[in-house]
Image (spheres, helix red, strand yellow):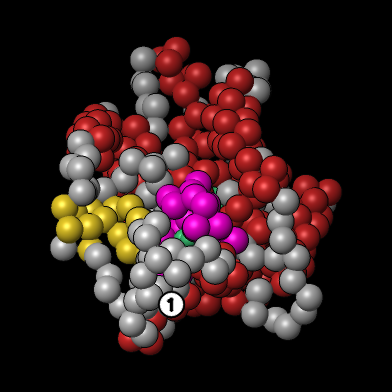
Amino acid sequence: MKIQEKRETPFLLIIFFLFLLLVGINAGEVSTVLETATRICLNCIGIG
Amino acid sequence: MLRRWIQIIATFLSNSYLLFPFTRNIYQGTLKSFCTPGLNCYSCPAATGACPLGALQNFMATLRPGLQTGYQHFGLYVIGTLGLLGSLAGRMPCGWLCPFGFLQELVHKIPSRKFEIPQFLTYVKYPLLALFIFLLPFFVADEFGYGTTWFCKFICPAGTLEAGIPMLFLKPELQALVGLLFYNKLFILGLFLLWMVYSRRPFCRVACPLGAIYSLFNKHSVFKMTRDPDKCTNCKACYNNCPMEVRFYESQNDIDCIRCLKCMNESCKFGAISYEITGFEESRDQGIKGKAVVRGQ
Ligand code: SF4
Ligand code: SF4
Ligand code: SF4
């Protein structure tokens, strides 16, 4: 295993998106996704 | 071969609700709180997860009335999930986990003359992402302020194939609603199915907004592909075998690289392709089939 220059951007991105994910969960978005995904989506089928 | 198995397992796990012929309905359990990593319609009778694109459009379509009532849901849960996956592996979910990507690879195996896709078309997915997932669902609203899921409604061939056609059989009463919208989507599905025979993964490369999101991370993700210029002979074997038509010898971590590793494991005879994880490179001294690496050829 060779070591090239270390990169920090991926870690900053992970922290940023983890933060967004947690804010979303905290805002109650998980139940909104559940609600959306358990309804039959007429648009997806192409008749809505 | 390992990738094939993972694709099969991922397709099955994304669609493993096998009770639908008895319930005559889609799965409604809590697993649907989680987004699938690939494009898999949540209105497919067998689907077990939520399509991230469908969920995002719904957040955008309901954002305006939400803002007025102080109920602000920006879709950060979905954006966070996709961003996290992208930061770790870039477009790798496309290469290993997405059922619709898998389908395109299988259809492409049908023997025929094959055609390249012009490079400029591969940028069409970005305006599609901006318009059909974010802007149109948010800005074009009805009298109550609600938008609609534009990509699902007018384009998504995965929705037509996985939800449209099976649901019309499962719930015959829906057949009365079939009209121009359905025929438009059926036409788009037919077009892409045909194109898949002749070109490599056309939907992924030209039109998929989810692939467009992941592609933004390819250059900055934890996992990255690398090329050793001393070993690479520009023989183009990587390009010839690449399911996304990436010219790896010119562009590593290209927007269309789905990290399938086919170039590394099955194509390059010179051991010039490897990967690195945040700076730690897995170097390869052997080309495929154990052939010794011929340096500087
Ligand atoms: S129609 Fe397409 S974008 Fe919409 S939820 Fe289904 S798979 Fe996702
Ligand atoms: S680009 Fe879209 S359809 Fe293609 S593999 Fe990725 S998520 Fe699936
Ligand atoms: S460049 Fe290599 S890893 Fe990337 S998509 Fe093509 S074959 Fe797969």
Find residue B232 and report its image quarter: bottom left
| B291 vs B200: above or below | below
Q: Position of residue B55 (x, y in %)?
A: 46, 42
Looking at the rendering, the stretch of residues picked out in magenta corresponds to B244-265
- Viewport quadrant of the C terminus of chain B: bottom left
Q: At 47% across and 75% down in the image, what residue appears? A: B267
User: Mark 1 sits on what residue?
Assistant: B269
| B32 vs B296: above or below | above
- Viewport quadrant of the N terminus of chain B: bottom left
Outermost residue on the front side: it is B296
Report crowding for label 1: few under 14, some 14 to 19, many 20 or more residues within 10 A (C-alpha).
Answer: many
| B127 vs B173: above or below | above
Task: Say whether residue B163 is left or right of residue B218.
Answer: right
Ligand 3 has an atom within 8 Å of the beta carbon of the residue at disc 1: no
Q: Is residue B254 magenta?
A: yes
Viewer-side residue, A10 vs B151:
A10
Q: Position of residue B185 (x, y in %)?
A: 74, 53
Q: Is residue B45 visible?
A: no
Task: Say whether residue B257 is left or right of residue B153.
Answer: left
Q: At 64% across and 46% down in the image, what residue appears? A: B122
Q: Position of residue B56 (x, y in %)?
A: 47, 38
Q: At 59% across and 61% down in the image, what residue appears? A: B245
Q: Main secondary structure of the magenta part?
A: loop
Tag 1: amino acid: Lys
Q: Position of residue B217 (x, y in %)?
A: 39, 42
Q: At 33% across and 86% down in the image, what residue appears? A: B290
Chain ID of residue with mark 1:
B
Outermost residue on the top side: it is B68
